[in-house]
Structure formats: C-alpha cells, structure tokens
Image (spheres, rainbow, N blue to C red):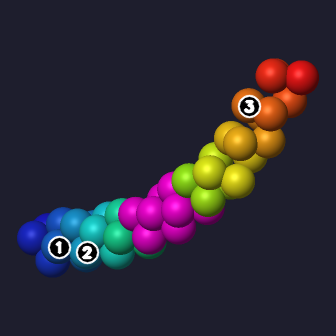
C-alpha cells in the first residue's frame, strides 16, 4: 500500500513539475506578446 502511495506521489510531482515548466514558458510568451502588443494598442486608441 505504501509503495503504491509513493508512486502516486512521484507521478503527481513529476506531472506537477511538467505543468509548472509549461506554465512558466506560457507566462514568458504571454509577457512577450503583452509588451509587443501593448504599444500598438495605445497608438491605435490615440488615433
């Protein structure tokens, strides 16, 4: 029982780290697109 629980925890942590890595790369991409698109949107709104 304890061994099964250990593998579940190990799988959970491995999946969690993968999700964190994907999330960090997504946030970097999101920040990059925000910094690129933000000046464009401000110039559009000013006319």
Q: Residue 29 in the image: x percent, y percent?
A: 61, 61
Q: Determine whether 18 is above or below 33 in the image.
A: below
Residue that extends furthest to the right in the rendered view of this protein? 47
What is the number of the mark on residue 37?
Answer: none
Looking at the image, residue 13 sits to the left or right of residue 23; the answer is: left
CA distance for labels 1 and 2: 6 Å
Magenta-colored span: 20-29
CA distance for labels 2 and 3: 47 Å
Local packing at callout 3 (Cα closer than 10 Å; few below 14, some 14-19, many 20+) is: few
Q: Is residue 25 magenta?
A: yes
Q: Determine whether 29 is above or below 2 in the image.
A: above
Looking at the image, residue 35 sits to the left or right of residue 37; the answer is: left
Q: Residue 12 in the image: x percent, y percent?
A: 32, 65
Residue designated by label 2: 10
Residue designated by label 1: 6
- Residue at the image point whose x is 10% and y is 70% from the top: 2
Discs 1/2, front: 2
Q: Determine whether 38 is above or below 17 in the image.
A: above
Discs 1, 2 touching: Cβ within 8 Å = yes
Residue designated by label 3: 42
């Amino acid at each position: 029982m304890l061994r099964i629980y250990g593998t579940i925890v190990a799988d959970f942590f491995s999946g969690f780290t993968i999700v964190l890595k994907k999330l960090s790369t997504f946030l970097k991409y999101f920040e990059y697109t925000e910094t690129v698109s933000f000046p464009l949107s401000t110039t559009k709104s000013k006319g």
